[in-house]
Image (spheres, rainbow, N blue to C red):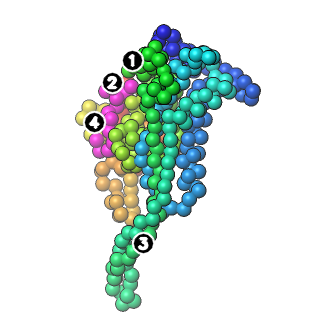
């Protein structure tokens, strides 16, 4: 029976690949599974934004991780097709099914937050009027907003929903490593043959805060996450497992990996989509040093048009954004060229 559910997932894949759209009854809209997933992602992000907008704070701390979509969709597929009262197929998307999927998503994910005032010491420099700089330690009260994201695994949901043994076997089959390419097709519209990391990266544009990328990598709290984002996208395509792109959290490590394999190009190159773009920022203030030959940031090349390199970058203002630069721009350190 597990193969039946897998076939249903393949139906999603076929629909995505050939542009088949299904009616969302009651609204007259036409939706694909990817569009529904994107809508739920936006609602999740809106909840985070609403929390930030509802309170006054000085410092934001985010921790935890949310359930990954393959697990959410696997639970949805098993629950929908094996409902003892009203089993349904999952190849099409209706308003009722969209509501069920959203209910499962929120049953698996939770967002909590709290505020705390902390009295902290800081040095303040003043001029005594005679040209002498005086340093004074003062107490400052900062309000910390702590947002914690937690989730339940697919196995925990199986217990919560009372899945019987056959349903649990179906769930395990859907989440088996050999079916990971199916999820990439369902969620991002890519297949093993096209290998477009760009499609995955574009699906993440608008993310704020870098969750789930840094938690997927293994960090327990917010970090500088541009490389985590690139690695996460690569993993979704199966590139890390196949040695196409390394798993790296530091830009220096990423540059070294490509250079050691002879897959490095300088900034004069006109890159292809999916190439990794590394930057060495110029900081005239000298706070973090001017260009020093050490990479500071990494993104993914989306395309090149009219002499400009268009990119998708994580941790650009703590968000996933599309940006562009002139070909040969001086802050582009160079390119890591994956061998797909």
Where does label 3 land, which residue?
140
State the CA–CA distance, disc 2 to disc 4: 15 Å
* Magenta span dominant secondary structure: loop
Which of marks 4 and 2 precedes in the sequence? Answer: 2
Where does label 4 land, which residue?
257
In this image, 138 relative to 317: left or right? left
State the CA–CA distance, disc 1 to disc 2: 13 Å
SS assignment at label 3: strand
Contact between marks 3 and 4 (CB within 8 A): the answer is no
For the C terminus, the image quarter is: top left
Q: Position of residue 222 (x, y in %)?
A: 40, 49
In this image, 264 relative to 203: left or right? left
Front position in the image: 18 or 30:
30
SS assignment at label 2: loop
State the CA–CA distance, disc 3 to disc 4: 44 Å
Q: Position of residue 333 (x, y in %)?
A: 36, 46
State the CA–CA distance, disc 1 to disc 3: 54 Å
Res. 266 visible in picture = no
Contact between marks 1 and 4 (CB within 8 A): the answer is no
SS assignment at label 4: helix
Name which quarter of the figure residue 126 lies in: bottom left
Where does label 1 land, which residue?
178
């Amino acid at each position: 029976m597990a193969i039946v559910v897998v076939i249903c997932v393949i139906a999603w894949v076929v629909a995505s690949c050939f542009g088949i759209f299904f009616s969302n009854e009651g609204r007259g809209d036409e939706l694909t599974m990817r569009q529904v997933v994107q809508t739920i992602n936006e609602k999740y992000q809106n909840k985070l934004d609403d929390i930030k907008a509802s309170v006054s704070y000085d410092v934001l701390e985010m921790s935890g991780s949310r359930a990954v979509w393959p697990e959410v969709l696997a639970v949805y597929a098993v629950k929908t097709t094996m409902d003892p009262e009203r089993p349904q197929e999952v190849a099409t998307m209706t308003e009722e099914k969209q509501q069920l999927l959203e209910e499962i998503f929120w049953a698996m994910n939770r967002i909590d937050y709290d505020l705390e005032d902390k009295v902290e010491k800081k040095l303040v420099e003043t001029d005594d009027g005679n040209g002498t700089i005086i340093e004074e330690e003062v107490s400052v009260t900062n309000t910390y907003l702590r947002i914690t994201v937690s989730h339940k695994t697919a196995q925990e949901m199986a217990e919560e929903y009372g899945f019987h043994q056959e349903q649990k076997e179906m769930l395990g089959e859907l989440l088996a490593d050999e079916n990971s390419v199916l999820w990439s097709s369902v969620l991002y519209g890519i297949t093993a043959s096209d290998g477009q990391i760009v499609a995955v990266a574009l699906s993440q544009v608008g993310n704020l805060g870098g969750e789930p990328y840094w938690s997927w990598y293994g960090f327990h709290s917010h970090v500088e996450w541009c490389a985590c984002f690139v690695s996460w996208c690569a993993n979704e395509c199966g590139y890390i497992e196949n040695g196409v792109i390394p798993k790296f959290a530091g830009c220096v490590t990423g540059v070294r990996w490509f250079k050691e394999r002879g897959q490095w190009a300088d900034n004069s190159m006109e890159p292809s989509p999916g190439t990794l773009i590394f930057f060495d920022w110029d900081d005239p203030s000298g706070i973090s040093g001017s260009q020093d030959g050490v990479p500071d940031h990494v993104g993914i090349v989306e395309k090149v048009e009219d002499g400009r390199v268009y990119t998708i970058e994580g941790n650009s203002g703590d968000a996933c954004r599309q940006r562009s630069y002139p070909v040969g721009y001086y802050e582009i350190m160079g390119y890591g060229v994956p061998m797909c």
